[in-house]
Image (cartoon, helix red, strand yellow):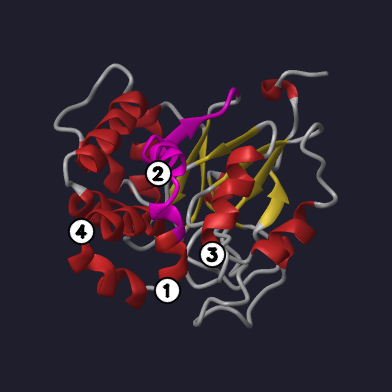
Amino acid sequence: MPAADDLPVLIVGDVHGDLERVFEALKPYPSDRWRTIFLGDLVDYGLFGVGALRYARDRANSAVLLGNHEVAMLWALRDPLRIGFWMGIGGQRHDLDELARDPSLQEWLRHRPALMKLPDNTLVQHCGSDAYGRLVESLEPDPIAAINNRVQELLANQGESELWNAMSGPNIFATSPERLDRWLEVTGGSRVVFGHNPHRSSRPEMYHGGKAINFDGGFSRHHRLYRRLTPAGATVAPLPG
């Protein structure tokens, strides 16, 4: 059986609790033949956010990134005063209760990376922004590791607000090629793949000659703003070579 790094890469954008649809979308892509990368925001809007987290966690040859909606859910779990805010962005109270009863899932979720780099130097992150760089004070020899370490520190020390702000902005890579190029230079990436801001295309949306690729095609049927837009294929797709 080939190692995970030798498998073709399948990107899964924002699932937002639509577990039934992700089951169907991934049927053509067996986990033993694909390395699957989930871009975060598996929770909220749909009814099965915690189920989606467990499915992604348990799927073989898979990696799961932290999304801003997971940050908001962990924030609400820690601080009941934030439950109203979280539910206002699509949070489902039964999901929060289920997460509260599962300490091992909480621990796993708090240790999800915000960034990762694939063997071909493709940078993978939740949102199409360089705001992650604000989480560290200065350039580090390994900026991706430094940012991921800082993310875990913030989650462990009531820093969800700072993390939410860094991960909830607009897709700036589509309109700012200069910032995209600087971000790729800082991180050593050849291109960047992300989700977070839904697009209207029937396939992943590419910018600046493919140096930035948006995989959030409005996948979840339960997302209030985007449920009528594009088919599942816009969010679940092989990473272009």
Mark number for residue 132?
none
The three-letter amino acid code for the residue at tag 4 is: Asp
Q: How far apart are marks 2 and 4 (CA)?
A: 14 Å
Q: Position of residue 8 (x, y in %)?
A: 75, 33
Q: How far apart are marks 3 and 4 (CA)?
A: 22 Å
Residue interval drawn in magenta = 98-119
Q: Nearer the viewer, mark 3 or mark 4?
A: 4
Density class for disc 1 (Cα within 10 Å; few <14, some 14-19, many ≥20) is some
- As for residue 58 lying within the magenta part, the answer is no
Query: For mark 3, what is the residue?
Result: 16
Q: Which of 118 and 2 is in front in this view?
A: 2
Q: Which of marks 2 and 1 is in front?
A: 2
Q: The residue tagged with tag 1: helix, strand or loop?
A: loop
- Tell me if label 1 and label 4 are in contact, CB under 8 Å: no
Query: For mark 2, what is the residue?
Result: 106
Q: Residue at x 76, y 35 (%)?
A: 34
Q: Where is residue 120 in the image (x, y as percent from the top left)?
A: 60, 25
Q: Position of residue 154 (x, y in %)?
A: 21, 40
Mark number for residue 79?
4
Q: Residue at x 77, y 37 (%)?
A: 31
Q: Which of 101 and 164 is in front in this view?
A: 101
Q: Which of 220 and 168 is in front in this view?
A: 220
- Tell me if label 3 and label 1 are in contact, CB under 8 Å: yes
Density class for disc 2 (Cα within 10 Å; few <14, some 14-19, many ≥20) is some
- Tell me if label 2 and label 1 are in contact, CB under 8 Å: no
